[in-house]
Image: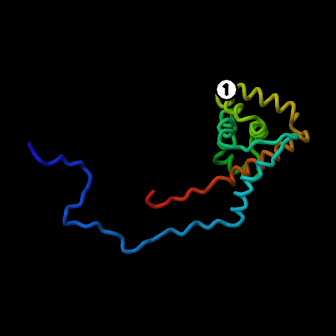
Amino acid sequence: MTDTLPDSGIPTLTPTEHPRLPDKLTFDEPAETSKQDAEAKTAAIINPQHRTFAGQKLHPFDWRRQEAADALGLKFFKLHGEVAAEFEETERYDGIAGDAAIVVWLCTIAPSQVAKYIRLPGQGTEARLKWAEEHVGGIGRQRHGEMMEVYGEILADFMSSLGEQVKTPGK
């Protein structure tokens, strides 16, 4: 029988070795955010609390509503390449009216309904189409223009609320 344990594979110091500590501490300068960026992020949090459409107070477009929107066929977050470049230039893309109806409608419904339509997107599409018929009426109507404006505000706030990912050494 031996009195030694098997090697664990973890490096260890021998009794004569000493850990080497850094002689100089360094730190990363915090990323500077412009006053405009800070104001945009603050507005992105405050604006949804006051937004309405067709006289109805809207819920914020949160991650659950984004998940439901994806399940219902939202195209915006899938824009890439030439289509994304065209959108940046023209602020239009194929399917924008449908996306607007999806997002604005989702912001009118209760969280429990949002969860239901994540699971049952077919029923969500039917409910959204019925809502759009009743509250928007169709392309070219005044309410359609209002819906498109609200959709633009929601997307702008959503995009402004996203933080910029910064790599931190050692993490």
Residue 120 in percent (x, y) is at: 67, 26
Task: Estimate how packed mark 1 is, as few (under 14), some (14 to 19) or many (20 or more) residues with alpha carbons within 10 Å.
Answer: some
Q: Quadrant of the C terminus?
A: bottom left
Q: Amino acid at mark 1?
A: Leu
Occupied quadrant, residue 166: bottom right
Q: Quadrant of residue 102?
A: top right
Q: Which residue is mark 1?
A: 120
* Quadrant position of the N terminus in the picture: top left
Q: Residue at x 26, y 55 (%)?
A: 11
Quadrant housing residue 109: top right
Taking the spot 67% from the left edge, 35% from the top edge, the residue there is: 68
Q: Where residue 35 appears, x then y in whole percent?
A: 70, 66
Q: Residue furthest left?
A: 1
Q: Provide residue 157's location: percent of width, then percent of height.
A: 73, 51
Q: Residue at x 74, y 29 (%)?
A: 125
Check disc 1 and report its element: helix, strand or loop: loop
**Residue 112, x across and y down, in percent:** 70, 32
Quick one: 15 or 165, which is closer to the camera?
A: 15
Q: Quick check: 42 left or right of 3? A: right
* Residue 76 placement, left or right of 141: left
User: Looking at the image, which residue sits at the far bottom?
Assistant: 23
